[in-house]
Amino acid sequence: MARPPAALLQGTLDLLILKALNLGALHGLGVSRRIEAITRGTFLVKPGSLFPALHRMEEAGWLAASWGNSENNRRARYYKLTAAGRRQFESEVSQWERIATAIAYALQAT
Amino acid sequence: MARPPAALLQGTLDLLILKALNLGALHGLGVSRRIEAITRGTFLVKPGSLFPALHRMEEAGWLAASWGNSENNRRARYYKLTAAGRRQFESEVSQWERIATAIAYALQAT
DNA sequence: GCCGTCGTATTGACATTCTATACGAGTGAC
DNA sequence: GTCACTCGTATAGAATGTCAATACGACGGC
């Protein structure tokens, strides 16, 4: 099993979470749903990937979290970007562009 | 350290090796050098990443290898794509395009 | 009260990449 | 002929990130 059709490429999850939260604060599952929406259903982020990532990013100071209630009146933890998180987002976007450009070059090579 | 400036995105190494060999047979270090060339110096693949990957891909039947001599008259192991390797290459290219497109969508979202 | 859903969380396995190190063989200088 | 250097291959060990599976509390509908 080389890779089970690769739900997502390792290294892109942070970028997608940052983008999702750059569009506005959300609770955990909301992040997951927004990622699915903005990638047109291409990326489905499972809880086992999502929550460790959110905790790691909060730890890194990119996200600020607070408890609140969801639309369905459930206890939910809301995340939003910090200033450092916005900088990190910018940085990851340009990193992604560098990589995507390089691979586009590579695939064109003759 | 979140990621040591991420020499490369996990999952793209196979694609780049397949592309390099799709341009013609090469020995190990030659693959490394060709990847650096076609990505305009963006991806530098170290031996410790390269050789395990080559062995894994040979094991998977995507590459066929044979001993020969390099231009510098060194003992070198030459790799070329098998038919399965070419199919795998096509598959990874379209996989990459799906992913790159999805992330482009995501980054445009408002 | 019971059941389905929402939302968060953890555990254990797995694959991949990186750093560091190693070694044999050919080459050129002297 | 031997020293230093490069070429080319190779592996061990550690770190990281993702996934599958599972769990649990609380709310709402009936």
Image (cartoon, coloured by chain):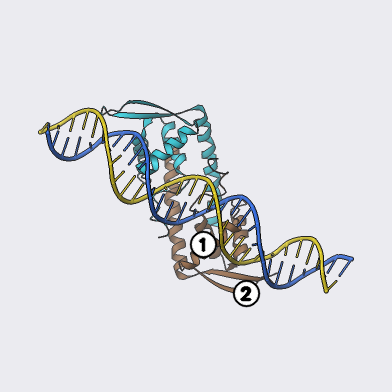
Chain colours: A cyan, B brown, C blue, D yellow
Instruction: Name the one closer to the observer, D5 or C1.
Output: C1
Q: Quickly name the residue at label 2.
A: B68
Residue in the image at 42% along x and 51% along y? B98
Residue in the image at 60% along x and 64% along y? B28
Question: Crowding near pointer 2: few (<14 within 10 Å), some, many (20+)?
Answer: few
Residue in the image at 36% along x and 26% along y? A67
Looking at the picture, does residue B42 appear above or below residue B109?
Answer: below
Q: How many marks?
A: 2
Q: SS for tag 2?
A: strand
On the same chain, marks 2 and 1? The answer is yes
Looking at the picture, does residue B28 appear above or below residue A39?
Answer: below
Question: Crowding near pointer 1: few (<14 within 10 Å), some, many (20+)?
Answer: many
Q: Earlier in the sequence, mark 2 or mark 1?
A: 1
Amino acid type at mark 2: Gly
Would you identify the image quadrant in which residue B78 lies? Answer: bottom right
Amino acid type at mark 1: Leu
> Which numbered circle lies on residue B18?
1
